Image (tube, helix red, strand yellow):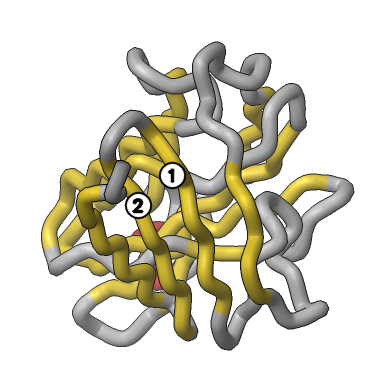
Amino acid sequence: MSQADETTLGAVELILSPHPDNSLMVNASVVTASNARVAIRFNSADTERRRTAYTDFGTDHNRVVLGLRSDTTYQFTAVAVFESGEKVLSEAVEFKTGPQPTGVPEVNLLAKNEQGEGGLPFSRHQAILVVLSGDLMKRASLSGTYMVICLQQVPR
């Protein structure tokens, strides 16, 4: 076995756990053998592969993965990019989300592009959502990989 092979064996360990507050979110913990930036890739049989943003360099990485569908089995893989530039993948880990949380407000989609992400029908380019909840109107706008949420009082 070459020295390069030895350094990548066990170099990236991914552990998933349910989020304590929401069954549609997953806690991802990644340990790397040396300093690396880490992102989490995930997809299901019905959704395209997506990934989180990369962490800063380090050896212990924690991410909360959002935007998952209820009662869906996902495959997760950690992608580590080491300081040397080497990219290493963890072994794939399977995780099934729980049921839709109770009390979820109704979401009215005002505009969308047909290139949905597989969960809520967000466009990769732009979507605007409005959620009415009590006295607040929450407006979310997604453009590229950024989401902006604005809150404003709803006139009565």
Residue at the image position 23 percent from the left and 63 percent from the top: 55
Q: Residue furthest right?
A: 45
Chain-order first, disc 2 or disc 1: 1
Quadrant in the rendering for residue 149: bottom left
Residue 39 lies left or right of residue 120; in this view the side is left
Residue 114 lies left or right of residue 84; in this view the side is right
Q: Which mark is residue 138?
A: 2
Quadrant in the rendering for residue 148: bottom left
Residue at the image position 47 percent from the left and 47 percent from the top: 131
Decide which of 30, 45 is in the foreground and name it: 45
Up the image or down, 49 lies above or below 16; here it is below
Whole-angstrom CA distance, mark 2 to mark 1, is 21 Å
Q: Position of residue 100 (x, y in %)?
A: 64, 21
Packing grade of label 2 (10 A; few <14, some 14-19, many >=20) is some
- Residue where numbered disc 1 is placed: 65
Q: Position of residue 147 (x, y in %)?
A: 37, 69
Up the image or down, 121 lies above or below 96; here it is below
Q: Amino acid at mark 1?
A: Val
